[in-house]
Image (cartoon, rainbow, N blue to C red):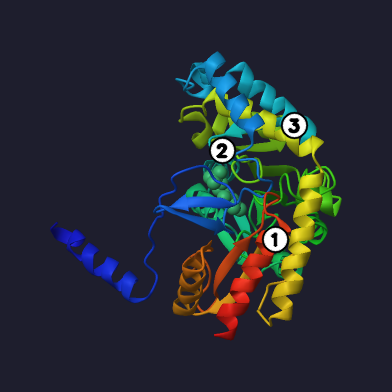
Amino acid sequence: MGGGFASLGADLAARAAAGLYRGRRVLEGPQATTVRVDGRELLAFCSNDYLGLANDPRVIGALQQGAARYGAGSGASHLVSGHSRAHHELEDALAEFTGRPRALLFSGGYAANLGVISALLGRGDAVFQDRLNHASLLDGGLLSGARLQRFLHNDAASLEARLARSPARRKLVAVDGVFSMDGDEAPLAALAAASARHGALLYVDDAHGFGVLGERGAGTLEKQGMGSAAVPLLMATLGKALGVAGAFVAGSEELIETLIQFARTYIYTTAMPPALAVAAAASLRIVREEPWRRAHLQELIGRFRAGANALGLQLLPSQTAIQPLLLGDAATALRWSEQLLARGLLVPAIRPPTVPRGQSRLRVTLSAAHSVVEVERLLQALADIAGA
Ligand SMILES: *Cc1c(COP(=O)(O)O)cnc(C)c1O
């Protein structure tokens, strides 16, 4: 290729030389604690299927029945003729479950964050983001044209100082409920108080809390006792703990109607297949009816942390299913990941730009589908590698 594209090869080579090249593994079967890759069975600690629902027979059955009733695809966007009864019922169920007047489905969390922020903000407005926010929140802010202000991670005083200085017409504070690469939770009460003092709207992306945290599994807000007065707008995905795909935003009548009218990633895209909505509704029922999944997951988290601490490994202060082991440079993280792979365990290394330089890690994730014995196998393998 000519012109400016002649440097693509050099850019790829530079990424490889820095130990940052990414590749994909091909799974030959379902997402489960044991996955089939390259003809090998690997014990995996890396999916976001926190409740073990991605391969649940009831969810698969719902998907099949949904396809039998509604067909394979939705055939149109929601505003044309793609909005089915299945979508509508799932929205109602999600609104009820999150204790909000309305919910709105998006094809994914990435699309939801782009759509929400760019529908609510424009030039002259400001978006305040935690430094460790997910890429989709940052990209939504960029797309909106609003002024970007980043504040120190989980630091309400740092947020407040920036809010106080901002002359913006509209101020939106966006945070992850559970930070995707660190596993810690946002301090919602403090962030909500700071937001309220400055007329800002707090928007929480609970991709990793929804289904997992709180007595009922309603997420980080439930766990921290926060309602819609503190957090008027909530987003969560259906592809993580719910094991399917898609996302939703929940909030007031006025906010949701605003999104239907102005969120371009809602308007100009094909509605998710209705069968996925039927499957996600089945997952949501399991989330409500099987609290033992959350209890078992908590037990595994406790065992993993105790075991890793005993080995002297550097954990982050996370109480969630995301339990990163901090290793430092990208090469070390890669080496640990490869040594685990040699022992039949799949835990990919997370490197820059996903995490800051010098903070490469193994992002261990636990699932209610794991057994205690499987977690012990991981700890044993980590002990071997740490000792070697
Ligand atoms: C995964 C994730 C998203 C994106 O959701 P998708 O449904 O996968 O597009 C958004 N925000 C956070 C915090 C996430 O972890």
Where's residue 5, x and y in %?
A: 20, 59
Residue behind label 1 places its C-beta within 8 angstroms of ligand 1 = no
In the image, is residue 265 above or below residue 34?
A: above
Q: Residue at x 67, y 54 (%)?
A: 370
- The quarter of the image holding the C terminus is bottom right
Q: Earlier in the sequence, mark 1 or mark 2?
A: 2
Answer whether labels 1 and 3 touch (C-beta < 8 Å).
no
Q: Residue at x 62, y 39 (%)?
A: 238
Classed neighbour count for the residue bearing mark 1: other residues with Cα under 10 Å, few (<14), some (14–19), many (≥20): few
* Distance in Å between CA atoms under marks 2 and 3: 16 Å
Where's residue 194, x and y in %?
A: 78, 60
Q: To which residue does mark 1 refer?
A: 373
Classed neighbour count for the residue bearing mark 3: other residues with Cα under 10 Å, few (<14), some (14–19), many (≥20): some
Image-quadrant location for residue 286: top right
Viewer-nearest residue: 41 or 386: 41
The amino acid marked with disc number 2 is Ala
The amino acid marked with disc number 1 is Val
Q: To which residue does mark 2 refer?
A: 245
The amino acid marked with disc number 3 is Arg
